Amino acid sequence: LRALRWYAPYDVRVEDVPEPRLVKDTDALVRPTLTTICGSDLHIYRGHLNIVPGNILGHEFVGVVEEVGAAVRSLSRGDRVLPSCWVADGTCWYCRHGYYTQCVNVNIFGFGPVYGESLEGALSELVRVPYADTVLSKLPDDVTDDKAVLVSDTLPAGFAAVQEGGVKAGDMVAVVGAGAVGLLAGLCAKLLGAGEVIVVDVLPERLEMARSLGFMPIDASLADAAEQVRSLTDGRGADVVVEAVGGEQPLLTAIDLARKKGTISVAGFHIHEYTLPAGQLWLTEKRLIFCIGDPIKYRRELIEHIRAGRLDPSRMITHRLRLEEAPKAFEMADRKQGIRVALTP
Amino acid sequence: LRALRWYAPYDVRVEDVPEPRLVKDTDALVRPTLTTICGSDLHIYRGHLNIVPGNILGHEFVGVVEEVGAAVRSLSRGDRVLPSCWVADGTCWYCRHGYYTQCVNVNIFGFGPVYGESLEGALSELVRVPYADTVLSKLPDDVTDDKAVLVSDTLPAGFAAVQEGGVKAGDMVAVVGAGAVGLLAGLCAKLLGAGEVIVVDVLPERLEMARSLGFMPIDASLADAAEQVRSLTDGRGADVVVEAVGGEQPLLTAIDLARKKGTISVAGFHIHEYTLPAGQLWLTEKRLIFCIGDPIKYRRELIEHIRAGRLDPSRMITHRLRLEEAPKAFEMADRKQGIRVALTP
Amino acid sequence: LRALRWYAPYDVRVEDVPEPRLVKDTDALVRPTLTTICGSDLHIYRGHLNIVPGNILGHEFVGVVEEVGAAVRSLSRGDRVLPSCWVADGTCWYCRHGYYTQCVNVNIFGFGPVYGESLEGALSELVRVPYADTVLSKLPDDVTDDKAVLVSDTLPAGFAAVQEGGVKAGDMVAVVGAGAVGLLAGLCAKLLGAGEVIVVDVLPERLEMARSLGFMPIDASLADAAEQVRSLTDGRGADVVVEAVGGEQPLLTAIDLARKKGTISVAGFHIHEYTLPAGQLWLTEKRLIFCIGDPIKYRRELIEHIRAGRLDPSRMITHRLRLEEAPKAFEMADRKQGIRVALTP
Amino acid sequence: LRALRWYAPYDVRVEDVPEPRLVKDTDALVRPTLTTICGSDLHIYRGHLNIVPGNILGHEFVGVVEEVGAAVRSLSRGDRVLPSCWVADGTCWYCRHGYYTQCVNVNIFGFGPVYGESLEGALSELVRVPYADTVLSKLPDDVTDDKAVLVSDTLPAGFAAVQEGGVKAGDMVAVVGAGAVGLLAGLCAKLLGAGEVIVVDVLPERLEMARSLGFMPIDASLADAAEQVRSLTDGRGADVVVEAVGGEQPLLTAIDLARKKGTISVAGFHIHEYTLPAGQLWLTEKRLIFCIGDPIKYRRELIEHIRAGRLDPSRMITHRLRLEEAPKAFEMADRKQGIRVALTP
């Protein structure tokens, strides 16, 4: 069985690994048919998170059920499935209230023991899926792997950012970061009726991608983004801002881009403490909505939008390689080549 | 004409002052009949804000119209009126969208030139009110000064905190700070159907006041408040937390008290930058709602609740003095004697 | 095995019946521990619905699992369970969207073949439950049968009426009909922050019950209810009206009681066509929300309210008999003695 | 002064009329620059409403202020203004709560004494406008008369239908009637993110208009509309249906088109009582939202959508004539030629 293991910063290798097995009777084994490299994989790749050397990476994927535990009710061998990258037990208080990403047994594929139990990832020929009835959902035949794969992580992240951020018809929405989360947040904002969507980045090809999707690109290396956004809104700023990069500076930029009484949806990856302008936030009454998306909560309606042709997340997949080339794929993603690299077995 | 002027930290004096006059034809002159000392007055008293020596303090008041400018449509001499402590022009983009506290011409009575135009306060026998048609609303005869006065600032602050914080039936609400904003936020939370309301403070008499209003008091000097709140909620924390003190530590406590996917409504007074746990906020997907209340937006429904007997903000008024005794009143408020000191002419 | 069978209008008999068996592997068998006679049972009793003679009645109940089919995942023999009176498959488009009462395979216990497949009721020592994983939920130990039983039908009906009717803090709510649905709708309205709750009926003991629950009773036999409601609201009418009787006249009364731009939640039992004042409804812009409650959707939060002491539906149970006395119980319910008759095996 | 007067069914004449004067100091006189013939004008034209012979018709218009009463604050001679066809006092309970169409002093231009005080219409060279500060709003220079005129009645009607009907991203929306209200409701549905919009009518040119606006036309004369809508939704029906014709049969069709738990927004003109399938509505839990639009409430955001290019109601204006030709214009409108006839002085 072949899989991609992380050993040290920038050191990942495709190797033979032991075959995963069912551990609990609520587990399933899934054979990934398409796996992508997501932004948070890069945090691991670069050594920002404490995962254990040898752990298999990969958490955004679709696949086919190979085997199910005795207690799995909704799935059978051979089913095409859409996993949630977030593992949730489906029964705790948070799950019962629809907050699956805050499950008391939460985990993410490929994050080693970051969340307690060590969980191997999906850049592998076979992956063990806990709480399969909750984590996996059957994929309709008419939704291709390309269209479905980002529903396991990135698309719900972008959707949650604008949905929980309260985007409504005619809103001016600004997105900081033209990566996959940011661009998909922009598409979801349009779906919710947003008026103008502005996308701020510094990479020319990403800004071009933003333009091709119908957004107004702003090159933050050439001009002050907040000033430009304000000049488009009689000096006010955006109604809703999606922070889709992570880190202190993008968050401060996002706060700056929002109008008074505006909302900042924080979808980027954050680990540290930052010095935030609390006094300014209070005087201008802004709202900071931290949200990481929730595939289990949002996948049903997102798949409906995809089937109806209202959303096409496959446009984010700009490169394709085989699992054996995964180290090269990580190098490309690390250098921000394209938007998303997808890997087939 | 007698009024209370601020000269330096802890130095306020009741003096003869020149009579205010109508400056624009949208102004009115109001004779205050009851004025209170609010928490933000204390920030000025202590020298935390750059107001100009000699400025008249006071912004939470009710009164009677003495004179109106030629363009004032809705008011006449003799009308009992409820002012908003926040002055707003009623016509800018923010006002038209119902965000009066973010008016481009915003100001607060008694805040000297903090907001541009210098505006004298209501601890005076007569006060000039700009944009009178927007700032003032007529007071129904059956609502006493005592019941109405806090609607000009503090009650809308408490109400906005729970309303914009999304409190719903059965929610566990925690309030940090048993001052007037916090206690009124608690009463408003109950009005919205909150299940349990927990109030955290360290002063015994304020905790006793919280208990007498039907809340569960937690003495933060005796125990870890977050631990106690979590022990009441199977380890989770409060659904909505109202920060009603101001400053870094109360905000950090409020963040800590909220459950994952919970909301922190920041109603306290904030001026500075703080180091906030962005990584933790993101992982636990909390929402930070900064809101300062909005008397113009909320006064109609709050007056309805008061008339119907569903809210009684007059319970906050624990001490009464005359305007001539205002310096003594500031000393009492500074020492946190009681909840609210009210002054009559 | 003893059970209550319907034979003809007003002719019900407790008899020996064949033991129910599991038919599908998603079925469970449940031993009822408490069953009530609900208003819709009376429609059957009186012959308003086409059920087949010999059918066992009863659909509002709690019980203990006796046996589960091979595919039932969430339950085991011995579990105390709260059923939904509405049977739903949990997988169709409606169920996936949270509209369980509109499931394409919907059915109700004891409604014979009204909904296609014949389904026996719970006034029996043992009852077959289809789609057990969806229809049944485990009951926490600290919620007694008395408190839980109405969550299987009546309490969600009352809750849906006010929740889907949009009751908010301070609303004046009027309820037509002081039966169990109406009284529980009133309690739920209070839970959502309603200001005044008015209850209209003609039976003195029911009006007295309304008064004892904190509502304002109006005896429609003595006065024009709409006029009285309007006199309490400066001539306007109620913000939200719950129609909780069924039939044309109560619906017309409910429409009349609502203010312009108000909402009528229709929770009563309706079978026929009525002549409705469409022109009047349009001119006054009223909203008619037909809703029958949804135990599967609402039971989790309702049980939470009950455990927290915020709702006590057991107050509706005014009489208790044994299953063998069920014919007598029907006679009592038919004569509107008390609010709810509950039967133990 | 020339104006169009109604004398009897199908008998309207352009005549010299006395010049209107200010009656109250809150009145204004407005010189219409563009007036349209709306569907409700046709009801008067045909004699369905009891207006007084000699009354001047016309209520959907834009114009220029000629004179203002002494108490009018927000307007001056020469201002371009957008009136609301609904006259409201701006101060009663309904107005204060944002329900201007239910004002206790409500009236409509050109409806003679239908609403109490007789009010002349806008098919005139000069028209008196009561409560000018509430009824009129200034029109931005960059919004042409063509784009603005329908905001005084028809566009808010279409917008309210989908907004108050709760249309959300991806919804299947069906519209009964491809007149101006229906087509604008369709455009507003798209603005709110609706997935598919289906428009049902029988007139080929109106169906073609629907197609050209991006909707799916269904010719109800050729096929069963409800069956077709269901065939597009796996047998369910539309999520939200807008009834935009008026009368019993269109309302029954709209009810039929909605899925279970779906919403019918009734925007058509209704005067009579109808026999409605209450039993069926209850079993399928549909929601009937009667709403007539509210220009005062919605004009600000609608003008923003128009300025931003997200809505263009001027596409409804298919014919243009002079005021002197108004009788001919009524004949055309009566024969349903085009969508909207507009008249200039």
Image: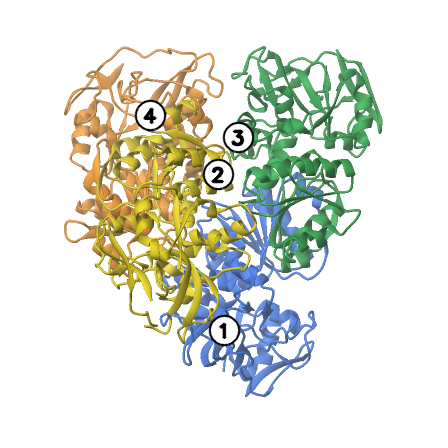
Chain colours: A blue, B green, C yellow, D orange
Position of the N terminus of chain D by quadrant: top left
Calculate the distance from the C-alpha at mark 2 to the C-alpha at mark 3.
12 Å
Dot 3 corresponds to which residue? Answer: B301
Looking at the image, residue C31 sits to the left or right of residue D283; the answer is right
- The numbered dot on residue A132 is 1
| Residue B155 seen anywhere in this rendered image of the structure | yes
Dot 2 corresponds to which residue? Answer: C168
Q: Nearer the viewer, mark 1 or mark 4?
A: 4
Same chain for mark 1 and mark 2? The answer is no
Q: Nearer the viewer, mark 4 or mark 2?
A: 4
Calculate the distance from the C-alpha at mark 1 to the C-alpha at mark 2.
40 Å
Query: Where is residue C71 shown, x and y percent of the image?
Result: 41, 74
Chain of the residue where label 2 is placed in the rendered structure: C
Residue shown at the point (36%, 54%) measured from the top left: D195
Chain of the residue where label 4 is placed in the rendered structure: C
- Tell me if label 1 and label 3 are in contact, CB under 8 Å: no
